[in-house]
Amino acid sequence: MANKTDIIFTLGDLNCAAHQWPDYLQYGFDSSDVTALLKIAGDSELHQADADSAEIWAPLHAWRTLAQLRCSQAALPLIKLFDELVEDDWALYELPIVLGMIGESAIEPLAALLNTAELDEFTHVMAVDALCEVVEHYPEQRDAVLAHYQAYLEKPDLSLPTLNGLLIGRLCELKAKELIEGIRALYQRDGVDTSCAGDLEEVEIKLGFRSNRETPRPSQAESYGFKAAPAKKPESGDVIDLVNYYFERDGNEQAIFNASELDGFFSALACAPNNIMAAQWLSALWGGEDKAPHWKKRSEYAEFNDAIFTFYNHVMEGMHGDEYHALFLVEMEDEQEYTIVSSWCEGFMRGIGLWDELTEEEDRNALEQALKPIQLFTTQHEGEALDSLSEEQINQSGLTIEPAVKTLYLHFLEQRQRANKPIQRTAPKVGRNDPCPCKSGKKYKKCCM
């Protein structure tokens, strides 16, 4: 008679790439299978199986099944796998979810792991993530989890700044305002990698303790621990370089961040049903009139505006032409080129915010379809949506942005042309000295002219 767990070895990469979990309980699994499933989940030979085999996926299907069983006795054995499997990307992502689904019984052993020294830093990160997942699945456990986070903040490991930064990111997700003093103390002790959740002012804004920054936003280099040099004005006069220079030098938390975001912003204006005048969008570049810089030199003000309007016209002409290309960022890592679309997408959504409300259902549907690939990469919508996609699906979504924007532009093209159509004169032209058409008896220049 075949073992029930044999099905685990036949599923292969079923729905794995999209992080979609099938219903494993449909195969008849229950508490009597826990021991066998734990053995599969921790089998080192299976973890080292051939990458193209179905066997290599068996541990993943086993721990997912244990998660759906909500099996408390599986908590400790699975937590013991954290440090063994910390180099496994699937385990790094999914085991915290599994422990979160198991719930209350996982809290104490996860807290113990978090405070165990001499483990891989990302083993601790998995513990932090798993505790947050417990609250996600069981909100009533929030106080218990926060108590353990608080205990860690009182005696943090300052040699693990990435862990501390990611922990603070999780506390922001949980809106853990009650732990703000511990968070502040951790920043004061210089124990946080600010590239994870931002600096203290940014965290205080996320938690509702302040509405605006008092200091300039750290540059990307500063976020990664490098001391930023003052913004240096480009010598080339290149429009993109100038735009980046002025936004880096004079920007704020609510301002456009870089040329890529500006390109997205102007692309949204180009797609709008009606022309959005410069008087409306100029202040939006800085997040409002009250946040615009106080220019010390008239020449710099003129130079910035020249660069901005040159950029604006370039985007408008590009959208109107046969080929449209968004100004996405490109980064190199390990000799591999990566396209970064998030800044551009943030700018596009900022531009959409200046549109008038759409009254026609057809127009609203057109906008909704165009925004689907764009919203995936914005801070307001990213997270679970992106986590559910494979790298290939994420790349494919990025490739659909430009066609979606062009389609939106064409959808509203007729409306824009109709709105901008010049008034046609139907009556014959009246001369300045002719009798006024209103029959007053006066000359046109002395009457209705």
Image (cartoon, rainbow, N blue to C red):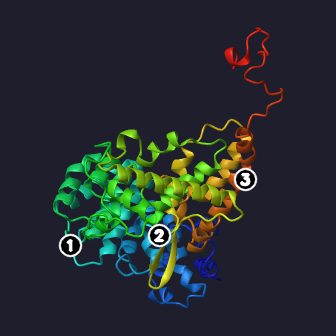
Q: Nearest to the eye among marks 1 and 2: give it.
A: 1
Q: Position of residue 208 (x, y in %)?
A: 32, 43
Q: Nearer the viewer, residue 391 or 201?
A: 201
Q: Which residue is mark 3?
A: 410
Q: Is residue 356 visible?
A: yes
Instruction: Report how far apart the C-alphas of labels 3 and 1 lie in the structure.
Output: 54 Å
Q: Position of residue 270 (x, y in %)?
A: 62, 51
Is residue 63 toward the left or the right of residue 290 in the image?
Answer: right
Q: Is residue 38 visible?
A: no
- Specify the quadrant that holds the C terminus: top right
Say which quarter of the image contains residue 166. Answer: bottom left
N-terminal-most mark, 3 or 2: 2
Residue 226 sits above or below residue 442 on the image: below
Is residue 431 toward the left or the right of residue 247 in the image?
Answer: right
Question: Hey, what amino acid is under mark 2?
Answer: Glu
Q: Which residue is mark 1?
A: 159
Label 2: few (<14), some (14–19) or many (≥20) C-alpha neighbours in 10 Å: some
SS category of the residue bearing label 2: helix
Q: Nearest to the eye among marks 3 and 2: give it.
A: 3
Instruction: Report how far apart the C-alphas of labels 1 and 2 lie in the structure.
Output: 26 Å
Question: Hey, what amino acid is under mark 3?
Answer: Leu
Question: Hey, what amino acid is under mark 1?
Answer: Ser
SS category of the residue bearing label 3: helix
Q: Determine the residue located farthest toward the top in the rendered image.
A: 440
Q: Residue at left 61%, top 59%?
A: 373
Q: Nearer the viewer, residue 32 or 83?
A: 83
Q: How many marks?
A: 3
Q: Position of residue 136 (x, y in %)?
A: 43, 54
Residue 42 sits above or below residue 250 on the image: below
Query: Are discs 3 and 1 less than 8 Å apart at CB?
Result: no
